[in-house]
Image: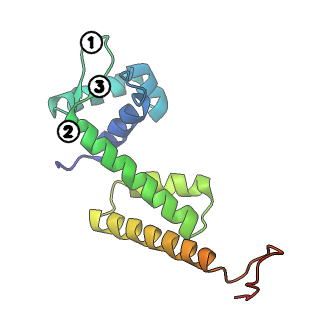
């Protein structure tokens, strides 16, 4: 996968999110989502189109190509993993975690993302196992009253 600039990744992610209903994204919606002018959004669309990441015809909706979708999905996945790691593992406030994930998703290595994802998965399993083993049961009919 070709390395893209932070800005290009943000545009792809915005198009991905705006077109999740199967329709394409409109320039005005992309510009609004990213807090940029329509002229800036149009310029970025030209660059993304030249790279073969979107289909962009004048006055038509914008769609991701398979390659563009792959980039956008992976950027979105990185965002979700980072945000989940920050909120569930580190207990960072959701608003702060989202803002930090937006910044970090562009520079973090794939290895780090996979490690975070595995850590989250393992923690979920450990948490489920701890709850299942019932170190403490508050149900009156439960005989397991051990406390941690």
From this viewpoint, which residue is outermost toward the right? Answer: 140
Query: In percent of the image, x 84 and y 75: which residue is there?
Result: 140
**Which numbered disc, 3 or 1, marks the residue that appears first in the sequence?**
1
Residue 28 position (above or below residue 83)? above
Query: In percent of the image, x 38 and y 47: which residue is there?
Result: 76
Residue 49 position (above or below residue 122)? above
Q: Nearer the viewer, mark 2 or mark 1?
A: 2
**Which numbered disc, 2 or 1, marks the residue that appears first in the sequence?**
1
Residue corresponding to mark 2:
67
Left of 53 or right of it: where is 116? right
Left of 25 or right of it: where is 144? right
Res 6 visible: no
Q: Quadrant of residue 112?
A: bottom left
Residue 103 location (% of width, % of height): 43, 54
For mark 2, give the secondary structure. Answer: helix
Query: In percent of the image, x 16 and y 32: which residue is there?
Result: 52
Task: Judge by depth and name the residue closer to the eye, 141 or 66.
Answer: 141
For mark 1, give the secondary structure. Answer: loop
Res 77 visible: yes
Residue corresponding to mark 3:
63
- The CA span between labels 2 and 1 is 21 Å
Q: Nearer the viewer, mark 3 or mark 1?
A: 3
Residue corresponding to mark 1:
58
């Amino acid at each position: 996968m070709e390395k893209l600039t932070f800005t290009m990744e943000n545009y792809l992610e915005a198009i991905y999110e705006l077109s999740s209903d199967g329709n394409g994204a409109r320039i005005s919606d992309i510009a609004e989502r990213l807090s940029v002018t329509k002229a800036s959004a149009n310029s970025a669309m030209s660059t993304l189109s030249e790279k073969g990441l979107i289909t962009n015809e004048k006055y038509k909706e914008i769609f991701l190509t398979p390659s563009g979708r792959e980039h956008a999905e992976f950027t979105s996945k990185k965002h979700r993993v980072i945000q989940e790691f920050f909120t569930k593992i580190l207990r960072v406030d959701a608003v702060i975690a989202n803002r930090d994930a937006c910044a970090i998703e562009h520079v973090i290595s794939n290895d780090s993302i996979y490690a975070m994802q595995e850590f989250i998965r393992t923690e979920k399993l450990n948490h489920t196992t701890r709850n299942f083993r019932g170190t403490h049961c508050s149900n009156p009919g439960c005989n397991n009253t051990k406390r941690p």
